[in-house]
Amino acid sequence: MKRLNLNFLLLLIGVVILSSCGPNISKFSHDGEGFAKLQDEFKAKFGADAYYTDIAINFTPGDSHGSGLGCNVTVTNDPASLKMDEWVYNSYTNWKNTADVTLEIEGDSSPEEFMYQLGDEFDLRKVGELIVESKKKLAEEKQIENAVLNLAMMKTPDSDAATETDIVIILKPENGGTTFTFRYALDGTLQSVN
């Protein structure tokens, strides 16, 4: 009986260890709910009041090495310093600070004009909803069912205010092939499809 309990205990510990290694990709579904959870993760990692210039979320389907969720984020908690950090996330290395970024701002502009905070106008939930909308549009107009997310991005233009930020969503057929790029204004208005 002791041997059976020990084997069961070892099995249970193994399951717990395996299930805790790396992120649970399924908790970040490619819709409004999943991206709202991702936004909460960003706020937990960088702070609720952090300022961003770039957020790129990519996804590689499959179970092989290199598949899963990846994020590139340029962020600061002190916009006046003009210093930002670039962070990269993938399921194998988790978060890693990969670069220090220094902004150059000409004229009387404040750094905050070129940055955004998550929530309200800059909401990842909205990005997730636009992914769903883009997939529907692809199914209706191109008869491509089950398209998958390749990249979702909110990037501040280099020479414009953060209010000019576009939401870019790149989808591809489930089995690979041509990518389709959807560009939206912050309010969700479709600007172009390529």
Image (cartoon, rainbow, N blue to C red):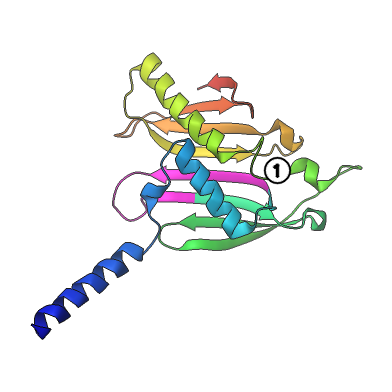
Q: Nearer the viewer, residue 80 or 105?
A: 80
Residue 134: % across, % down:
46, 25
Q: Quadrant of residue 2?
A: bottom left
Q: Is residue 125 left or right of residue 29?
A: right
Residue 63 counted in the magenta span: yes
Query: x, y (%) of residue 169?
Result: 51, 32
Residue 126 occupies quadrant: top right
Q: Looking at the rendering, which quadrant does residue 192 occupy?
A: top right
Q: Is residue 140 left or right of residue 185?
A: left
| Rendered residue at 55%/44% (across/down) | 56
> Alpha-carbon neighbours of circle 1 within 10 Å: few (<14), some, or many (≥20)?
many
> Outermost residue toward the bottom?
2
Q: Tell me the residue at 73%/44% (across/down).
A: 115
Q: Which quadrant would the N terminus be assigned to in this image?
A: bottom left
Magenta-drawn stretch, dominant element (helix, strand or loop):
strand
The residue under label 1 is: 116
Q: Residue at x 63, y 45 (%)?
A: 54
Which residue in the rendered view is the most extreme toward the left? 1
Q: Is residue 166 above or below residue 18?
A: above
Q: Kindly identify the amino acid type of the residue bearing the numbered disc 1.
A: Tyr
Give the percent coordinates (x, y) of residue 121.
67, 35
